Amino acid sequence: MSDRIHSLSGYMYEYQKSVQDPESFWSRIADSFHWRKKWDKVVDWNFETPDVKWFVNGKLNITENILDRHLYTRGDQAAIIWEPNDPEEEHITLTYKELHAKVCQFANAIKAKGVGKGDRVIIYMPMVPEAAIAMLACARIGAIHSIVFAGFSANALSDRINDCKAKMVITADGNFRGNKQIPVKEVVDEALKNCDSVESTIVLKRTGQDIQMTSGLDIWWHDAIEGVSSENKAEEMDSEDMLFILYTSGSTGQPKGVVHTCGGYMIYTAYSFQNVFQYNQGDVYWCTADVGWITGHSYIVYGPLLAGATSIMFEGVPTFPDAGRFWAICDKHQVNQFYTAPTAIRALQAYGTEPIEPYKLDSLKVLGSVGEPINEEAWHWYHDHVGKGKCPIVDTWWQTETGGIMVSPLAGITPTKPAYATLPLPGVQLVILDNEGNELKGNSVEGNLCIKFPWPSMLRTTYGDHDRCKQTYFSTFPNHYFTGDGVKRDEDGYYRILGRVDDVINVSGHRMGTAEVENAINEHPKVIESAVVGYPHDIKGQGIYAFVICDMEGRTQEGLTKEIKETVNKIIGPIARPDKVQIVPGLPKTRSGKIMRRILRKIASGDGDNLGDISTLLNPEVVEAIKEGASH
Ligand code: ATP
Ligand code: MG
């Protein structure tokens, strides 16, 4: 594609153009897509109400751009390679032609069940190709999909079904995860006891486990497509029609139904995918996320397939059958771009380099990271042992709400710096504001990360509650989108994400990002992972409380605690020296692998009996253990 940036000066040039004249810039990018009707105006916006429209009055269907457009040029190329949980099971390859046929057929099948344009469909599925087929089938007929991660509880699922009043649920009998077999359909049955809006459920047979099928409600996937045509004319959609709703992971509280629309999301995910990963035709790209997260939406399915890429989908977990599984898959499919999360990297780092040694990993060209700040130690481990020192790391900062990657190096083009997301993508106009809303210009500044101009894939609203969208993102700083994250722009103009501003600790008037302190703690060779929070402190205002997972071999608790404090002292200075260090067996995490600091904050401040609902945690059992060991 002509929109590929090839050099640092090319990036600078494109960035300047995108700021000076955003309309011509995005109009040029959008021109290379297939539109049923071109837009009348590139962008219409108001950050007060807020109201944002891109490619106004343009008509399209995103699946024509993903499937039909590629049929003649790359019909026989693999679109999706699916790698099952069990390495003994055969992988599946779906070419663009095959994917097209399957999507059209399933689109016809759900239409026959009464789902139409504008209806909401919940997808609660394992990581199987049918999950992508279900998404695209919805998009094909103009139904709005909302994927719920298949590890969520019945309660969490029914909340989301009710919030968007879904008409259909697409699910599976069960889910293979490592050694486990998770009863997915059973959870749906439980959830549906509290939902009136659902008229039918389509169930994929995956594990073959025993399940209950309710006549008149449940139908097997294979029965639903039986004898159904594989031809389907895509529904014509407006640029601003909803494409999907995705509930945020909820690390900061009640999940929000983030709404993305067809036109802008299409342009931005394709553009950012090609430029960040520097994908070349024929490359094999693998993002290890689940389709239940925004990363899975934008960078397993939509972005890569829009770009005509080969995208791997993996059903399993990084440690099954052993901690070398990721690397086995990289070699098996000759993966060129590999995109994962710091939580996975740190988990694998804990096994040492032995599980990597049997593998060549010589096909890898680019490594990516997303989801939280990647600490320097994990960055180096990833760079040296996985990338063998020759693969640039793209540390990509973005959010469910931004739809696509906002700040990241372009692989091999932007010089990287460990723990820095580096520079904004073209079209992304970042500003740093102090707490009073004054813009902090120039370099070597730190504050609230905001965006002052719309970008095509930004959220349009929070489903069913526009005021919540306004309050959450557009009210803290008038006329700005507020990300909720703290950031530093260093002396070179590079951006480093400091963590959520709610997590910022104020010690004797010095503001400190949790990420920065954790990064220092993690430099200690015995530390596997850490989480830092503030707690009320009589003299300093806030004290620093560190929860740390360690390899205890050859160390005493007391000795290690002291060493950790000293490490921080040395790296950042006495001001950041943790007041308390607690060695813990695990940290409370969301299902997407993020640390739930709000729980740790409560424990640290002695309010551990008042944690609220912790059932959506990945590992609720560690909470008790942490509470027991807490010091006050
Ligand atoms: P909720 O908004 O419900 O609390 P969430 O913010 O965890 O959920 P996501 O949209 O998945 O849901 O996460 C976005 C956040 O993840 C960012 O705001 C940022 O705090 C963090 N993040 C993502 N990528 C990076 C990165 N590369 N570096 C630093 N932080 C990152
Ligand atoms: Mg968030």
Image (cartoon, rainbow, N blue to C red):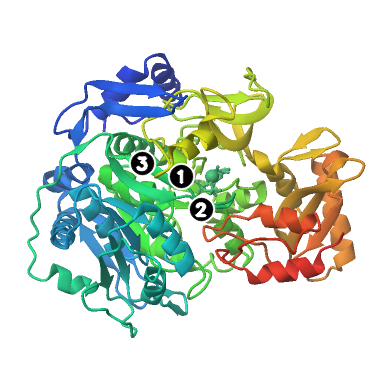
Please name the residue shown 21% across and 29% down the image.
Answer: 58
Q: Which residue is mark 3?
A: 260
Residue type, label 3:
His
Report the disc number at residue 249.
2
Q: The C terminus appears in which quarter of the rendering?
A: bottom right
Quarter residue 205 falls in: bottom left
Residue type, label 1:
Thr
Dot 2 lies on which element? Answer: loop
For ligand 1, tell me if the residue under mark 3 lies within 8 Å.
no
Query: In the picture provided, is 623 more to the left or to the right than 56?
Result: right
Query: In the picture provided, is 538 more to the left or to the right than 51?
Result: right
Front residue of this view, candidates 305 and 235: 235
Where does residue 97 sit, x and y in percent of width and height?
A: 14, 55
Front residue of this view, candidates 384 and 100: 100
**Separation of marks 3 and 1 at Cα, in angstroms:** 9 Å
For ligand 1, tell me if the residue under mark 2 lies within 8 Å.
yes
Dot 1 lies on which element? Answer: helix
